[in-house]
Image: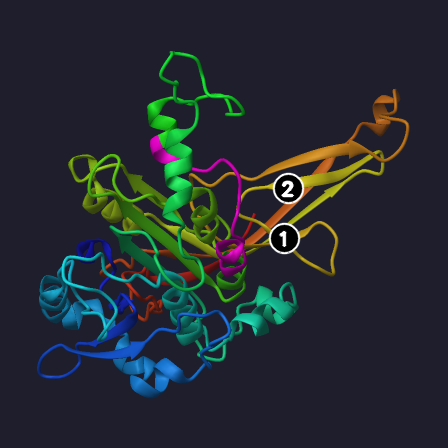
């Protein structure tokens, strides 16, 4: 995916298990430093924890000058690294994966904002403008995951996967088991798992990342069909609420992650958007759909962390009076306004194009342009 990034893009590499590994490629050879990840939600990071271990300026490096070093660091990563800390797993046991604490720590690292701090200020003008203490206006965190989160906030309960696969199974006499919901197809069971949201950690984390100007993309690959269960009904909100994308591959044979990653990073991306919709007095908005975060103070004003040409928004409307007028001069109307900044690949002849920061796996970058539609 490095080939898809603009030469002036800033890139950072991190790994996670029960600790997070931060790579620095600015020295004579790539180096990695590890920080233990908390298991309980009550164990919070301060904004400066990862920064004290490795300053952000050492974590992020431009792709053009450090491409070979990044490639060497990526090749050094195996499915067994980073090694878990002592006592986390026996020989042959599945590695501990604390994805929730890892993504929370990275978002705080890149933005300089703590989790609760961002949620309290959600929708304020400074949040809509992404005035992060770190000075980074926009980041894109891309996660490549092959085993589900197994510990800490956001962990996936594998028992729910067994329950989902067991729904609608026939009993020994050929009759459907009592008190079971209608059976889904094998493909639906394989992908969807549970049918209702049971953990709001990823929903809140997605909103937090959106307010920090950070999009979270996830590329999830199962080892094989019927292996570890991913609670996509809950995990997807990390991407959908932050303006990111989620890619799911049911087995290694079906994985197209390299091609999808290249396509995702090579597309122009609109960031830090403000979307306003107004209607005439006869009707009003009742509900919104899509990657929008409604302003808590101003009516019909929404924050859009990021979007591209495939992003869709939807709205439901309801009458605020007896209905539409029959007078042709009083026909109902809708007014839309969309302001955003556009990051697109920098052209070689351009001079002074601004660099965009990105981390954890990859980033989109280029010259920033302010646009209003």
Region rendered in magenta: 190-205
Identify the residue under disc 1: 302
Element carrying mark 2: strand
Q: Could you give the CA–CA distance between mark 1 and mark 2, rounded to whole angstroms?
A: 10 Å
Front residue of 244 and 368? 244
Q: Nearer the viewer, residue 91 or 10?
A: 91
Q: Which mark is residue 288?
A: 2
Question: Residue 36 placed where, x, y %?
Answer: 31, 77
Q: Residue at x 67, y 57 (%)?
A: 295
Q: The N terminus lies in which quarter of the figure?
A: bottom left
Q: Judge left or right: residue 150 versus residue 199.
A: left
Q: Residue drawn 57% across and 49% down?
A: 292
Q: Which of pointers 1 and 2 indicates the residue nearer the eye?
A: 2
For disc 2, the neighbor class at 10 Å (few under 14, some 14 to 19, many from 20) is some
Q: Which mark is residue 60?
A: none
x, y percent for residue 224: 20, 38
Question: Residue at coordinates 51% horizontally, 74% vertically from top-left?
Answer: 42
């Amino acid at each position: 995916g490095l080939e898809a990034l603009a030469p002036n893009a800033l890139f950072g590499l991190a790994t996670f298990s029960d600790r997070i590994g931060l790579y620095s490629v600015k020295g004579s050879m790539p180096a990695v430093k590890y920080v233990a990840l908390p298991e309980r939600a009550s164990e919070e990071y301060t904004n400066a924890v990862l920064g004290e271990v490795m300053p952000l300026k050492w974590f992020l490096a431009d792709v053009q000058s450090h491409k070979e070093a990044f490639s060497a660091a990526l090749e050094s990563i195996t499915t067994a690294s980073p090694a878990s800390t002592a006592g986390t797993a026996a020989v042959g046991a599945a590695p501990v994966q604390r994805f929730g604490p890892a993504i929370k720590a990275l978002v705080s690292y890149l933005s300089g904002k703590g989790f609760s701090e961002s949620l309290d200020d959600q929708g304020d003008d400074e949040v809509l403008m992404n005035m992060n203490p770190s000075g980074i206006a926009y980041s894109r965190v891309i996660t490549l995951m092959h085993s589900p989160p197994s510990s800490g906030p956001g962990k996936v309960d594998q028992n729910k996967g067994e329950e989902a696969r067991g729904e609608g199974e026939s009993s020994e006499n050929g009759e459907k088991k009592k008190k079971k919901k209608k059976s889904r197809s094998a493909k639906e069971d394989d992908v969807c798992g549970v049918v209702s949201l049971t953990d709001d950690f990823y929903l809140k984390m997605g909103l937090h990342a959106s307010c920090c100007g950070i999009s979270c993309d996830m590329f999830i690959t199962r080892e094989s069909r019927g292996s570890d269960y991913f609670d996509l009904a809950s995990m997807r909100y990390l991407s959908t609420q932050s303006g990111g994308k989620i890619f799911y591959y049911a087995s290694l044979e079906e994985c197209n992650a390299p091609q999808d990653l290249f396509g995702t990073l090579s597309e122009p991306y609109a960031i830090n958007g403000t979307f306003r919709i107004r209607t005439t007095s006869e009707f009003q908005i009742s509900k919104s759909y899509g990657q929008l975060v409604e302003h808590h103070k101003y009516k019909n004003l929404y924050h859009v962390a990021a979007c591209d040409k495939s992003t869709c928004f939807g709205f439901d409307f309801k009458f605020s009076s007896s209905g539409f007028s029959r007078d042709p001069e009083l026909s109902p109307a809708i007014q839309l306004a969309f302001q955003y900044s556009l990051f697109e690949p920098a052209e070689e002849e351009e001079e002074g194009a601004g660099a965009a920061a990105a981390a954890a796996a990859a980033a989109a970058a280029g010259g920033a342009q302010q646009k209003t539609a």
